[in-house]
Image: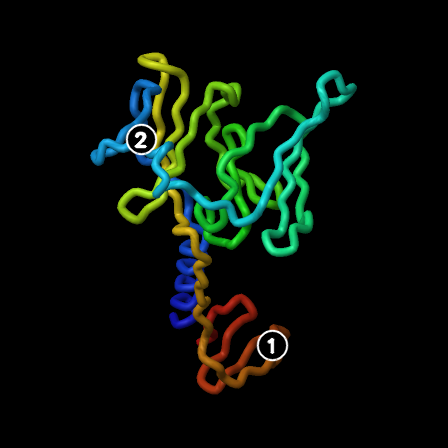
Amino acid sequence: MKKSIFILAALFAATFANAQITLEHTFDGGGLLVFTDGGNHSEDESNRIQAPCYYIWDETPYGASEYSCWLELYDPETLDLFRKIVFDEYTLVHYVTRNIFTTDNKITFLANDKILNEDKEVVYDLNLGLDPGYLRYDLVKFNGNYKLILRTGYGSNGKTYIYSLPGNGEAQAVSTPSSPKRSARKIAREGQVLVETDTNIYTLQGTEVK
């Protein structure tokens, strides 16, 4: 029973550490979403998101035989290049952040309709399948929580999506519960290997032997 409790507690902690991006609501119409304070949050200085590093987006020159574009990440202290992420197709990059799209302290960013991390792993797929030129984004902090506002199209032909984000801009350390220390040793009984503690005997799969 105790073993099950510890496993469940560990799974809960892992789930918390990897909290998910969630689509909260979809509005018909691709107009700018304005919150109740009347402010245009895409132009509000108090809501601008500071990048965790310097970065450059660039692409191969026009007429090159093969196209690619890339994102270069530079250390803010030394200005050394520490990561270059190459894309084989046209990819617009927005909102280079840390601990907003995730809580694992990795740099993450919007790349067309996906959220990627610095290892080029997909954190979340918005799965819109649209040309990046038709997508407009706002990343805002509202009532202490970060939201991604994504708009497609214009006027009545568009849609506006609101996503809640798990991070608050700071790393979140989660300690994993561990079982209490006890003396344990392997024993053999009737051809089966078992684990014996001071009070119980278990199979290698954790089932208590009566």
* Mark 2, other Cα within 10 Å: few <14 / some 14–19 / many ≥20: few
* Mark 1, other Cα within 10 Å: few <14 / some 14–19 / many ≥20: few
In the orientation shown, which residue stands out farthest toward the right? 65
Check disc 1 and report the residue beneath it: 190
Q: Position of residue 116 (x, y in %)?
A: 55, 39
Residue 40 — which label? 2
Q: Position of residue 6 (x, y in %)?
A: 42, 68
Of 183 and 199, nearer the camera is 183
Q: Nearer the viewer, mark 2 or mark 1?
A: 2
The first of marks 2 and 1 along the sequence is: 2
At x 39%, y 48%, the residue is 166
Residue type pointed to by label 2: Asn
Compared to residue 123, the image places residue 205 above or below, namely below
Compared to residue 42, the image places residue 133 above or below, namely above
Of 183 and 30, nearer the camera is 30
Residue 139 appears left or right of 194: left
